């Protein structure tokens, strides 16, 4: 099985709906093993664009990288993503594979707050599961 960490983002007026629907579709595929909450961040690089909703998810899939990439890009397109979306500054859905089998493919994204926030949430849950707090 292959593992990946993906980032999800949307900054359209219906960004909450876009994110919830994307998660529902990914969960229906049975490939999400962990995910962060959905949280808001300021746009990176252009302060005139609307704020984003972001999330990070861990994926476990028998598919190879090309198949997963194509699946995620098809999901973006089904949510209205076009080549012009980035130019307009309104992104219905953006999904990127940031880490693939422990190899960081998108180091700039990996370092950004919009990814680190979600990654830290996932790691905190993992740490809690491995080291549960015992109360007496």
Image (cartoon, rainbow, N blue to C red):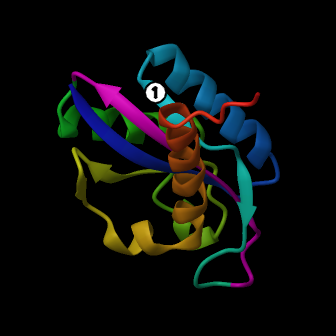
Q: Position of residue 11 (x, y in %)?
A: 71, 58
The quarter of the picture where residue 70 lies is top left
Which image quadrant: the N terminus? top left
Q: Residues within 10 Å of mark 1 (few under 14, many from 20)?
A: few
Residue 82's place in the image compared with 37, above or below, is below
The quarter of the picture where residue 51 lies is bottom right
Q: Is 85 on the left-hand or right-hand side of 69?
A: right
User: Which is the main secondary structure of the residues drawn in magenta?
Assistant: strand
Q: Is 34 on the left-hand or right-hand side of 15?
A: left
Residue 80's place in the image compared with 47, above or below, is above
- The answer to whether residue 17 is magenta is no
Which image quadrant: the C terminus? top right
Residue at the extreme front: 136
Q: Position of residue 59 (x, y in %)?
A: 39, 33
Q: Position of residue 117 (x, y in %)?
A: 60, 61
Q: Give the residue at mark 1.
A: 33
Mark 1 lies on a secondary structure that is strand
What residue is rendered at 70% in x and 46% in y? 38
The front one of 61 and 94 is 61
Residue 109 in view (yes/no)? yes
Q: Position of residue 131 (x, y in %)?
A: 52, 37
Residue 30's place in the image compared with 52, above or below, is above
What residue is rendered at 59% in x and 38% in y? 79
What residue is rendered at 19% in x and 39% in y? 66
What residue is rendered at 52% in x and 61% in y? 115
- The answer to whether residue 51 is magenta is yes
Q: Is 39 on the left-hand or right-hand side of 59?
A: right
The front one of 99 and 121 is 121
Q: Is 104 on the left-hand or right-hand side of 24?
A: left
Task: Tell me where the magenta segment starts and ends, as one range.
Answer: 47-62
């Amino acid at each position: 099985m292959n593992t990946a960490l993906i980032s999800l983002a949307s900054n359209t007026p219906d960004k909450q709906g876009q994110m919830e629907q994307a998660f529902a579709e990914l969960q229906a595929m049975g490939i999400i093993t962990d995910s962060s909450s959905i949280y808001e961040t300021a746009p990176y690089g252009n302060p005139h664009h609307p704020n984003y909703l972001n999330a990070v998810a861990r994926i476990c899939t028998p598919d190879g990288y090309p198949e997963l990439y194509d699946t995620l890009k098809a999901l973006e397109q089904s949510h209205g993503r076009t080549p012009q979306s980035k130019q307009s500054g309104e992104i219905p859905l953006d999904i990127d594979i940031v880490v693939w089998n422990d190899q960081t493919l998108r180091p700039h994204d990996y370092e950004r707050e919009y990814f680190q926030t979600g990654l830290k949430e996932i790691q905190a849950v993992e740490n809690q599961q491995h080291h549960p707090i015992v109360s007496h």
